[in-house]
């Protein structure tokens, strides 16, 4: 073999070794897949936030970078209050606390900031939370953090002219799952005990929930194709184990739909007709309805046009997103009077 041929062969062998190592990393750890998903989701979140800019009202009062847990770099929140002119003559306001999505492996409170500003323009006070994401942190760390944030906000509410006895917990996508868990541990002592988390609120303080496009069953075995790979990656990263479906520390509590009772707070549940997670929201609504828990839903016909994707509610250029906003705001007002 010529010297040139040997060099080509050596280069091919090195490339093959690198590819084998890369493939092994994807099989041995959730990190490569989780980081890819994070990059894709962060890009999508930035685009959605930019599209909301024309809908942001003037005069919203902002308190950015507030701390709910000084021991954690992720223990931060932003607070958005209605313009002062819209608050004349009003007493302390109720507070909506929003938990961002991101598949448990991405996202930050900044993703929700413009939507929170829109809500503030509707007369609502809104706090957006950070929490620790996977694989850097594992379950149930975000549940514990959101619970702690609620306790801090309730205790400090008067500092911003808010009423800590009238809280609404909201979430989108993975944030909806976390919000549902925190709500359930607040009202079901056995569930709180199973999670090992002491509720930060009294049940009466948590007036309602807004749950958009969430997953409420944490398994991948009943999904196929790219969806199965996605769920396997994020659940492996979030749970901290490849065997999340049988792991007692995860499977016993993460499927929140299995632990609901009639004590669940009044919930507004919605998802788009083209959302891959739509069956989760439908199953959650069916379970709450069967239990007799207070419920309002916003679902769409299967053939609804245009097809409404995951996180459709953040698209305020379309009538369906504006409808979701109107109905959610009205729901919050009715349950925090």
Image (tube, helix red, strand yellow):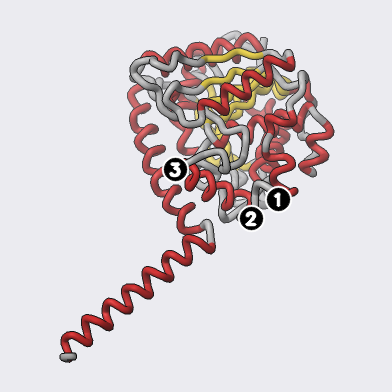
On the rendered structure, is 283 left or right of 102?
right
Quadrant containing the C terminus in the rendered view: top right
The reply to whether callout 2 and callout 1 are in contact (CB within 8 Å) is yes
User: Could you say whether the residue bearing mark 2 is in a helix, strand or loop?
Assistant: loop
Where is the N terminus found, in terms of image quarters? Answer: bottom left
Query: Residue at point 59% right, 44% down?
Result: 131
**Callout 2 environment at 10 Å: few (<14), some (14 to 19), or many (20+)?**
some
Residue at which label 1 appears: 247
Is 102 located above or below residue 114 in the figure?
A: below
Sequence-first disc among 1 and 3: 3
Residue 216 is situated, as x and y percent measured from the top left of the image, at 62, 32
Numbered disc in front, either 2 or 3: 3
Observer-side mark, 1 or 3, equals: 3
Query: Who's the residue at 64% across and 14% down the image?
Result: 295
Would you say residue 336 is visible in this rendering? Answer: yes
Q: Give the class, few, some or many, for how many residues have Cα within 10 Å of label 3's Cα (few <14, many ≥20).
A: few
Q: Percent from the top left, x then y, of residue 38? A: 45, 48
């Amino acid at each position: 073999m010529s010297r040139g041929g040997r060099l080509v062969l050596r280069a091919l062998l090195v490339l093959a070794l690198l590819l084998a190592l890369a493939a092994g990393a994807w099989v041995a750890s959730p990190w490569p897949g989780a980081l890819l998903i994070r990059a894709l989701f962060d890009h999508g979140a930035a685009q959605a936030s930019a599209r909301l800019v024309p809908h942001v009202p003037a005069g919203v009062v902002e308190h950015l970078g507030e701390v709910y847990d000084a021991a954690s770099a992720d223990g931060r929140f932003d607070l958005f209050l209605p313009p002062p002119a819209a608050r004349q003559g009003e007493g302390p306001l109720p507070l909506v606390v929003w938990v961002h999505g991101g598949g448990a492996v991405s996202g930050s409170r900044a993703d929700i900031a413009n939507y929170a500003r829109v809500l503030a323009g509707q007369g609502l006070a809104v706090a957006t939370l950070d929490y620790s994401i996977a694989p850097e942190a594992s379950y149930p760390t975000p549940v514990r953090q959101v619970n702690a944030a609620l306790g801090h906000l309730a205790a400090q509410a008067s500092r911003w002219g808010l009423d800590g006895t009238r809280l609404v917990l909201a979430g989108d996508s993975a944030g909806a799952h976390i919000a549902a868990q925190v709500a359930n541990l607040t009202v079901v002592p056995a569930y709180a005990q199973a999670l090992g988390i002491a509720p930060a609120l009294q049940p009466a303080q948590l007036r309602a929930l807004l749950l958009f496009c969430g997953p409420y069953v944490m398994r991948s075995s009943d999904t196929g194709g790219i969806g199965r790979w996605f769920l396997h990656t994020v659940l492996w990263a979030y749970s901290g184990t490849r065997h999340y479906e049988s792991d007692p520390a995860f499977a016993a509590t993460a499927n929140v739909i299995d632990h609901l009772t009639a004590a669940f707070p009044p919930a507004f549940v919605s998802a788009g007709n083209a959302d891959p997670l739509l069956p989760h929201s439908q199953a959650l609504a069916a379970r709450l309805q069967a239990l007799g828990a207070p419920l309002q839903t916003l679902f769409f016909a299967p053939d609804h046009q245009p097809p409404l994707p995951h996180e459709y509610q953040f698209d305020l250029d379309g009538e369906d997103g504006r409808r979701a906003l109107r109905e959610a705001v009205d729901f919050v007002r009715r349950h925090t009077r």
